[in-house]
Image (tube, grey):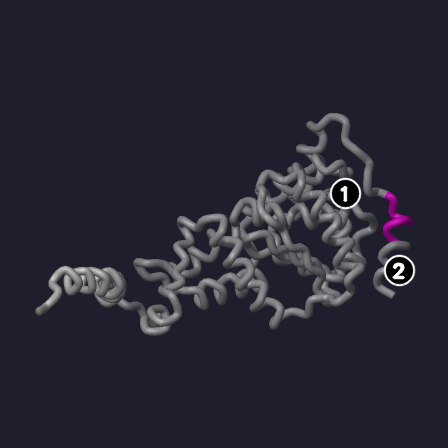
Amino acid sequence: MINWNGFLASYRLWRRRWFYPFISVSVALSLCLSTPLPSKAIDLLPLLFQGVQIFQLSNLSTRQEIDLGKQMNDELRQEVRISRNQQLNSYVEQIGRRLAANSDRNIPYTFQVVEDEAVNAFATTGGFVYINEGLIKTAENEAELASVIGHEMGHIEGKHLIKQMQQRAIASGVASATGLNRSQAVGIGVDLALNRPRSRQDEYDADKRGLRALTRAGYAPSAMVSFMKKLQGRSSIPTFLSTHPGASDRVKSLQRQIDNQTGNSSYGLDNAAYQAKIRALLR
């Protein structure tokens, strides 16, 4: 005699385990197939079998942004050479932590030194900041170095790279109705971080945010202006400025903001102490 109660219970268990996941995959499949595919469309099968990791850049959560930044960092470490000088990295991180504690965004930051003599710095997303050794050597004091770190943190705070990634994805036709897959998002982000200048508006915004964090952290705000002026006066324009348009206007804007502040600090302006520290760290 058939135990109908047991049979029905087993059927319901089977349906829960297999029917609903099947429906979910079917919906995802129909959505992708019903969307007109551009020339660089998302490869569907890898998405289905790798967990369908899709980034909606227009509605990215903080957790997703940090995860995206980590994945970009993995890719960038194959493109640039991260310094293994633990003491130098620790020193830059120490400055960064001081600024992060006074920034307007509470996310975990990661500060890394790049073994490159070019005077440059850049940031991706989710808290990842990169400073070239060439820039560290060019700065005359700790406050000038802090001003650059603060500026790059300002880009992260303003989510400037994410906005650029979205614009690039739409312009190049790789964004679908669901968004971007992981490899596409990482590839676009890394390329933009390394090779493309940000807009004039983004630079002004990063300057403003960086100056605010610099001042709150107790550093001399004048260092942001002095460092930028120093680079402008060089015979050849450093990468740091050549990829950041409107430098002279930015100097004027920063100086106006500093002039309107009261009780500006002079912390971090000891040139001799900084130069001695850097020489010891780079031996």
Where disc 2 sits, the SS reads helix
Tell me, for residue 204, which label it has, or none: none
Rendered view: 276 above or below 38: above
Q: Is residue 146 above or below residue 240?
A: above
The quarter of the image holding the N terminus is bottom left
Give neighbour class at mark 1: few <14, some 14-19, many 20+ (Cα, 10 Å): many
Identify which amino acid the numbered label 1 is placed on: Ala
Residue 18: where, in percent of width, then height? 24, 66
Is most of the magenta stretch helix, strand or loop?
helix
Dot 1 or dot 2: first in sequence order is 1
Q: Which residues are magenta?
A: 270-275
Percent from the top left, x then y, of residue 23? 22, 62
Picture layout, residue 217 above or below residue 184: above
The answer to if 164 sits in the magenta stretch is: no
Residue 150: x %, y % from top left: 67, 46
Residue at image mark 2: 280
Q: Secondary structure at mark 1?
A: helix
Foreground label between 1 and 2: 2
Hey, which quadrant is residue 224 in on the image? top right
Q: Say whether residue 40 is visible.
A: no
Label 1 sits on residue:
223
Q: Residue at x 89, y 60 (%)?
A: 280
Amino acid residing under circle 2: Ala
Q: Is residue 254 visible?
A: yes
Return the x and y of residue 48 as percentages of the image width and height: 33, 69
Answer with the quarter of the image where residue 158 lies. Answer: top right
159 left or right of 207?
Answer: left
Between marks 1 and 2, how big is the CA–CA gap?
22 Å
